Image: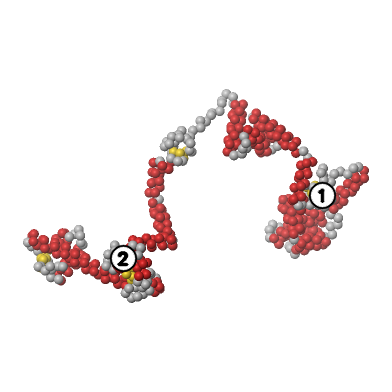
Amino acid sequence: MDSKENKIIKEVIKYYRLAPTDLMGISRNKYITIPRQVAMFIIKEELGLSYPMVGKIFNRDHTTVMYAHNKIRKLLLVDPEIKKDIETIKNGVDIGASLKSRFISFKNLISSKKSANQKSVKWNPVFSQCRMCNTTDFEYASEGYCQRCFPKRNLESSKKIKKKLFKIHNFDHIATTSKIRLVSILKIWDEGQTLGSIGVKFELSRERVRQLVQRAIELEYSNNNSNSRGEDFLKYYNKRRKERSMKVHLMHNPERPPKVKIERWSTEHDFCLACGTTKNKHRSKGYCTKCYYKSDYFKKAQSKSWQNNKHKYKDKIKEYHKRYNQRPEVIKRMKEYNEKLSHGGNREAALEHDDYKCTQCAMTREESYKKSNKDLYVEHVNGDFNNNSLDNLATFCFRCHSKKIAIANKKNSEKIKTMNSLKVLDVIRQYNIKCQKSIDFKTITLLLGGDLGEDAIDRYVKYLLDNNHINQKYGNYTASDQILV
């Protein structure tokens, strides 16, 4: 390692207060990577070394040095602190005249000698010097700018320069020569030569020859058709490739011609089994895309999948119904529908008729929401559910509604009790008349087994005994003369 390079690295370590191993190490911490990039930039700029040589100093690849150099060069335009850092590091290191500056001065010396002896050589065929810095110190980059000024150029002015270049140089000549090359490459390719052999002749890579062949076929297609791209072009391109492969096969194997594949609608069928056409694509089992979903095969497959995954579908349907019934618009719609069914759409009218209060305890609607978190109930007065007139509808709170239901349940239970006990009494009476003897409990259960259970029959028999509608003697029963109403 040269002493100047050592000096720069030591000065960078000293300035940024780093350990000697950090700069040459593997760490990617930003507090270490930026000093490392600064050191690479100073060595490249001041000593004029190549990217691979700088990379060897830091045990890095040349691409990392290129990245570091470009990054610091961009930061110098934006960040003034890095500019100060680099200047202080340069002042701390007594490098002397850098190789780059020496090279530039040597180049200027030669150019001055040439200008004295002979006519000055132009920096570029179009531009004699850089359009921004008005010098020829750096090499020409593009559009009349040197390598240093090219990134800072104004894009609008570059468009004008391009127009100037197109006027000076005859680009039509270049276009015609490229077309001639494309045609010649396509001709050799059609003859059966490989891409590699064509590449050797024209000094091109194999991939580049393939691209040029494709471009030539595209131009050939565009001359015959207006649209040069799309599905038609791809078909044409594949057709040309097939023709060429056939030629190559016949050249190498003239005795064995290639087997021509017969294009069928599908591997097993020539047309759709349902509609008998080949317009639509084949879907499955000899059916096209339209007819497949109407076929018996699809219906059987669907029923099989339903049977195999029945539990999954049912769970999904249940989950969907839960989410559907929780929607506010659905709740509102179901409420309106239930009101029409139960009250004929007169529920709100009945509530207005009773001033939104319970007819028994005068509880308001707001109070019922607070106490029971429920709305007021609207019930039919006479029990006729078909009569939905306002005279037959009355409002009740939660408590009064439950009391009414309890009373109605009691009445219903008494009715049921009398009806079933009448059944038991009729069975006993008919048996006594027909057989002219008393009946035991087993025969009663046999005769009424279809309608009532043993516990219910036992309960109704006890009820009849308590009310003296039947008499018991030695476990047998006989009907009395008392009538059960």
Residue nearer the viewer, 73 or 355: 355
Q: Quadrant of the N terminus?
A: bottom right
Q: Farthest residue in the top direction?
A: 255
Q: Is residue 276 left or right of residue 380?
A: right
Q: Is residue 484 left or right of residue 21?
A: left
How many neighbours does mark 1 have within 10 angstroms: few (below 14), some (14-19), or many (20 or more)? many
Q: Residue at x 69, y 34 (%)?
A: 182
Residue nearer the viewer, 435 or 199: 435
Closer to us: mark 1 or mark 2?
A: 2
Q: Secondary structure at mark 2?
A: loop
Residue nearer the viewer, 187 or 255: 187
How many neighbours does mark 2 have within 10 angstroms: few (below 14), some (14-19), or many (20 or more)? few
Q: What x and y, as percent, mark residue 34? A: 72, 59
Q: Residue at x 76, y 50 (%)?
A: 157
Q: Farthest residue in the bottom direction?
A: 361
Q: Quadrant of the C terminus?
A: bottom left
Query: What's the mark number on residue 130?
Result: 1
Residue nearer the viewer, 125 or 463: 125
**Which residue bears the numbered disc 2?**
389
Q: Farthest residue in the left direction?
A: 436
Q: Secondary structure at mark 1?
A: loop
Q: Is residue 278 left or right of residue 238?
A: left
Q: Residue at x 12, y 67 (%)?
A: 483
Q: What x and y, as percent, mark residue 109? A: 89, 48
| Three-letter code, disc 1 | Cys
The total number of labels drawn is: 2
Compared with residue 234, is residue 341 higher up or lower down, i.e. above or below? below
- Is residue 242 at least partly visible in the picture? yes
| Three-letter code, disc 2 | Ser
- Is residue 2 at least partly visible in the picture? no
Give the CA separation, mark 1 to mark 2: 101 Å
Q: What x and y, as percent, mark residue 48? A: 81, 52
